[in-house]
Image (tube, coloured by chain):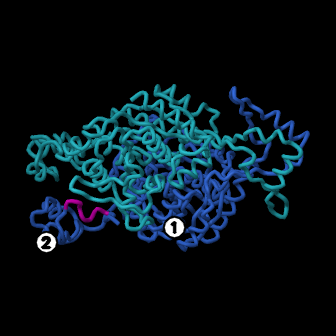
Chain colours: A blue, B cyan
Amino acid sequence: MENGGGDVPENANDHCPGTQSEAAGKADACAGCPNQQICATAPKGPDPDLLAIIERMNTVKHKILVLSGKGGVGKSTFSAQLSFALAEMDYQVGLLDIDICGPSIPKMLGLEGQDIHQSNLGWSPVYVESNLGVMSIGFMLPNPDDAVIWRGPRKNGLIKQFLKDVDWGEIDYLVVDAPPGTSDEHISIVQYLQVAGIDGAIIVTTPQQVSLIDVKKEINFCKKVGVPVLGVVENMSGLRQAFSDMKFVKPSEAGETDATEWVLNYIKEKAPELLSVVACSEVFDSSKGGAEKMCQDMEVPFLGKVPMDPQLCRAAEEGRSCFTDQKCSASAPALKSIIKKLVKTQ
Amino acid sequence: MENGGGDVPENANDHCPGTQSEAAGKADACAGCPNQQICATAPKGPDPDLLAIIERMNTVKHKILVLSGKGGVGKSTFSAQLSFALAEMDYQVGLLDIDICGPSIPKMLGLEGQDIHQSNLGWSPVYVESNLGVMSIGFMLPNPDDAVIWRGPRKNGLIKQFLKDVDWGEIDYLVVDAPPGTSDEHISIVQYLQVAGIDGAIIVTTPQQVSLIDVKKEINFCKKVGVPVLGVVENMSGLRQAFSDMKFVKPSEAGETDATEWVLNYIKEKAPELLSVVACSEVFDSSKGGAEKMCQDMEVPFLGKVPMDPQLCRAAEEGRSCFTDQKCSASAPALKSIIKKLVKTQ
């Protein structure tokens, strides 16, 4: 791993004592180093911001990271629904979005167009319910379509501010939704949060091999930086739909015609027993055992599978909880049982 | 946008003349700046690496970026199949993977476990066919599960090396597969490639709103940095399957039982006409017009839709071209027509 704190600059001499060392700029190894003068004169000691983070996190009982190796596996959907579920269980919940370049949390919580307010206690989260507060760069953009074209150091600076300056109040859970990968955001959030204690990370994946390869990287990242893996969630585990939710087309040489109404009438008349079966499609091939087998191999807990469910996608798009009505009957029970497992082990 | 070249350091004084300026370290504004000494003594002028990149890119006719706002929309699958298709059209093709933390290109080209070789001409790509060479950090990892825990500067350094040191030879197309977002990798690839000329970017999305929001950011990124948008591809545009490819379960209070065989026999006997229809599922809600409408609004070309196709996922997982057999009949024709459009406009 790279030095998280930038304690040894990239252009430093060999045997650099580290910029925080008392010998910085004064050791024999420093002779001729381009950083020598800065090192010799810069203030030493721990980053005062870390002390501010420790103080701020004093009122947060549990801190959970939600990670994924690959993007688009439903990580933000999971973070959002986890937060909704914890809030419905009457916990005090904070949801922090550290995906700086592609924040989707505001939309998934139904909070598009909201602003952050400042008080003398710091930045106030945006509240969905009185016990569910949300913070995201999405609330800070004058135009939601604007690209945030930032290199690492600026992203790290904002993440630090999110931890240091947001007034979460007394909360039971802080859920942190990270972008995919193992780079600046991940090194920074772990480095900043570890001083205050992290409960662990939940890793979200799909059953497909390309996603599982990246999940292994993510698990190895957690092991390397010392963050416990609370477990792996397999999302989009096959699509399940009743016939009445599907559409049908009839292909012909002249093109396609919609046949949905005809098919449903035909089934009702000729084959009514079909109405009681559920159609399953494996969009992503899980023939190699999917996430469950990978978890055995990597010796981390497997939390469960969540079926692909167009109704869950819709709930996410509309910023709704999937637990308050019966629409997400294919996915909500699976999510609920995973979340119950998590809460039990905390 | 941040200064791409780091010409004004983050900790510089106001009115910094830029580290590359002749006045660097000597202007009035430099007094007291921590960088003053380095700036006053460092060598000036254009980055010599950029000259090396220009020279290397002299033998590359077209340079195409493949971007996406969100991850998991099938960007790497598209890049891989685009490269296969161009190679099958007898072009000389190079595919460069700049997703440093989550490289999936080696797997998608069937090249897992391959190594890069060095010659006096530079790094040799790994070849799928004699006219399709591939470069990825995936070929450089001793263990494919290892996490690449790198902050921005190291990622930028490797991307520069990929452009400067890889011996592509005389090629018609260099396809560059980028990670999702608008951060270090994107700023760097544009900055390094622009000196040699970029044809433009293809942006891949799904029909869902959360992906479209991020695509708008990506289009605005391209506009800001001056990269032409060649067009937008809508991927995973609804799942299409014949009954014979589906599985069925019968839910009951005691649990679920597999009913696939029973359903197919029942259909054959009672409702055989169903065998000629295709079932369509909209996994991602596109009721708001999807990518096509967004393209009209943003005034960029719409290249077409590629249906969600489990067979295409499988081809990607197995590192195969989807064009060489008939398995991907739901997706391959759509991909082909998009690629033909692209080649025509070049």
Chain to which mark 1 belongs: A
- Is residue A192 something one can see in this rendering? no
Residue B99 is left or right of residue B309, and the answer is left
Number of numbered discs: 2
**Dot 1 lies on which element?**
strand
- Range drawn in magenta: A5-11
Instruction: Answer whether residue A7 is magenta in the image.
Output: yes
Magenta: main secondary structure: loop
Indicate the position of residue A306 as horizontal and vertical percent values. 66, 57
Q: Residue at x 30, y 54 (%)?
A: B124
> Marks 1 and 2, Cα distance to the nearest angstrom?
39 Å
Task: Say which quadrant the N terminus of chain A sits in.
Answer: bottom left
Q: Quadrant of the C terminus of chain A?
A: bottom right
Q: What residue is pinned by disc 2?
A: A27
| Picture residue at 45% right of the left edge, 71% below the top | A223
- Identify the residue position indicated by label 1 in the image: A200
Snapshot quadrant of residue A332: bottom right
Q: Write the residue at 74% across / 52% down.
A: A329
Q: Are marks 1 and 2 in contact (CB under 8 Å)?
A: no
Q: In the rendered image, is residue B237 in sight? A: yes
- Please rate how many residues cluster around mark 1, counting C-alpha atoms within 10 Å: few if below 14, some from 14 to 19, many from 20: some
Where residue A199 appears, as percent x and y from the top left, is 52, 68
Q: Nearer the viewer, residue A124 or A232?
A: A232
Where does the image place residue A157, in percent across and percent down from the top left? 35, 53
Q: Residues within 10 Å of mark 2 (few under 14, many from 20)?
A: some
**Magenta-span inclusion, residue A337:** no
